[in-house]
Structures are given as structure tokens and as C-alpha cells.
Image: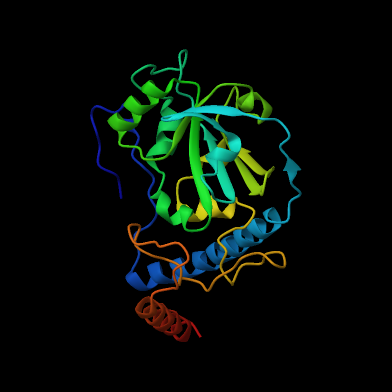
């Protein structure tokens, strides 16, 4: 079997060496063999997230300032009243390729993948982007690209202190009263997986906060599925919708019976 050729492509003369074409039964058998490895990968990822939740923290002692749409803000303000804060350092500023019309292409791909923030917010987590561009430029860029995440302007050495002055990166913080702690950091290919609600929650100290997770004693946890909601329907402190509880319980029971 050869792939369709494209005369405009330099590689058109070299046909793709595609996998064999097999019967539906052989295909399903191959899928089941791979599924064993995929499930092992999922379990290993969950174990890694559990270990991440047990990493030591380091306290943030300095005061940092950011410009926002309505004025100057502290690092504590960026939490927006929540306990967890994820800060992605995006490169949008003079000297970055694309300025002033665009941010860095890689950072823009990250921004394009960010899921609706209501789901993170429902887990006591805030996600923000920070750059050195002035707020008027950030507002223009967000409008053009239809990005909804809060995006603040760096004004001091925050980026250098947290390893993101020369390259993109994601820092995670936890707020306990007036104290702020840095709990995790990733960059390079680690940032490539970011964007989805679950991947963001998996790098936070509290995790997804569901009962199946292996978390330290006393960490907040609620029944799996029950907190899920439409992004326009979350109400802080509300009990899970009774009908959704019935539906999710029935769906989970059917799934587990099928896989016995």
C-alpha cells in the first residue's frame, strides 16, 4: 500500500511505508495488545501525579507586582481568591518573533489549547498567562486570537526568579492564608501536554481532588464525576446535581460490569 503523492512535496518521490492492512479481527487483537501497554502507561502517570502531590514546597518570600487590565496586582491577587495558581510564562514582547501582531508561535499554540477555565476554577485553581508586553497590547492580542485566560504584565524579576526569563515554562503555586508556596515547575516538552483540564490539575498540589486518587491524608476529595458540570452552570458550594449523580453512577456501573 502506498500513500497518495503530492507533487508539491519534496518527499513525494518516497512513498510512506504504512503498516499492513488486516482483517477487523486481527486489528482488534492488535488494539487489545496495545491497550495493555496503554493502561500501564495510565497507571504510571497516575502514580507520578501522586508522587508529585508529595513533593516538598518552597515558600515565596519576595513581593512581586503585575499589571492587569484594572491596575497593579500582587502575586497573591493573581490567585483570584482560590488556593491554587498556575502561571504560564508566554513570550509576547518586543524582540520576540511576531511582535507586535503575534506572540511566540509556540506560546500561541499553548494558548490555543487551553480548555474552558470554569472547570479549573471549580477545583479551586486559577490559570494565568504572564508576559512583558503592556496591557493594551495583550488586550489587542487576546481579542484577535479569541483567548479568554487572564493575562498579566511582568514588572519585575518574577520571570528570572522562577526560571522563565529566557524560555517558556509553567509554575504552580499554593496559597495558605498570607503565605505562598511554589510547588511545581515544568518547561520544554512538559509544556506541550498542557491545555486540558486534567493535565493542569495533575500538576497541582491538590490534584483532581477525586476519591480514587492517591493523595496525602486530609486533602480535599469528592466522588468521581459528581462535580463535573456545564461550564456555565458551576455554583460555588452547590451540592452535585441529583440527576447527574444517578446518570454517572449508572454509567460507571455499566462500564465496570462490562469489563469484569
In the picture provided, is 169 more to the left or to the right than 112?
A: right
The answer to whether residue 12 of the structure is visible from this angle is no
In the picture provided, is 237 more to the left or to the right than 55?
A: left
Depth order, front residue of 215/123: 123
In the picture provided, is 60 more to the left or to the right than 141?
A: right
Is the residue 15 above or below the residue 212 in the image?
above
Q: Residue, x 45% and y 31% (percent of image)?
A: 107
In the picture provided, is 188 more to the left or to the right than 241?
A: right
| Residue 168, image x, y percentages | 55, 30
Depth order, front residue of 27/129: 129
Q: Residue, x 45% and y 62% (percent of image)?
A: 236
Q: Residue, x 63% and y 57% (percent of image)?
A: 49
| Residue 154, image x, y percentages | 54, 24
Is the residue 132 above or below the residue 237 in the image?
above
- Total numbered labels placed on residues in the image: 0
User: Residue 155 appears in which quarter of the rendering?
Assistant: top right
Q: Residue, x 59% and y 58% (percent of image)?
A: 207
Amino acid at each position: 500500500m502506498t500513500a497518495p503523492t503530492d507533487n508539491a512535496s519534496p518527499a513525494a518521490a518516497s512513498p510512506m511505508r504504512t503498516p499492513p492492512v488486516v482483517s477487523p479481527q486481527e486489528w482488534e487483537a492488535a488494539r487489545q495488545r496495545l491497550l495493555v501497554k496503554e493502561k500501564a502507561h495510565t497507571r504510571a502517570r497516575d502514580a507520578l501525579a501522586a508522587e508529585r502531590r508529595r513533593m516538598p514546597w518552597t515558600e515565596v518570600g519576595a513581593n512581586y507586582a503585575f499589571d492587569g487590565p484594572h491596575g497593579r496586582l500582587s502575586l497573591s491577587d493573581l490567585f483570584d481568591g482560590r488556593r491554587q495558581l498556575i502561571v504560564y510564562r508566554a513570550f509576547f514582547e518586543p524582540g520576540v518573533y511576531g511582535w507586535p501582531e503575534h506572540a511566540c508561535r509556540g506560546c500561541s499554540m499553548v494558548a490555543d489549547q487551553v480548555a474552558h477555565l470554569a472547570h479549573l476554577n471549580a477545583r479551586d485553581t486559577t490559570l494565568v498567562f504572564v508576559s512583558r508586553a503592556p496591557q493594551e497590547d495583550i488586550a489587542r492580542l487576546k481579542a484577535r486570537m479569541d483567548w479568554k485566560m487572564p493575562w498579566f504584565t511582568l514588572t519585575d524579576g518574577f520571570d528570572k526568579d522562577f526560571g522563565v526569563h529566557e524560555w517558556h515554562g509553567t509554575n504552580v503555586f499554593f496559597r495558605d492564608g498570607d503565605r505562598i508556596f511554589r510547588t511545581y515547575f515544568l518547561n520544554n516538552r512538559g509544556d506541550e501536554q498542557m491545555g486540558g483540564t486534567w493535565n493542569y490539575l495533575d500538576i497541582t498540589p491538590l490534584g483532581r481532588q477525586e476519591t480514587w486518587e492517591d493523595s496525602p491524608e486530609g486533602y480535599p476529595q469528592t466522588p468521581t464525576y459528581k462535580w463535573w458540570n456545564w461550564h456555565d452552570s458551576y455554583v460555588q458550594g452547590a451540592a452535585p446535581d441529583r440527576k447527574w449523580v444517578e446518570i454517572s453512577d449508572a454509567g460507571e456501573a455499566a462500564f465496570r460490569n462490562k469489563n469484569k
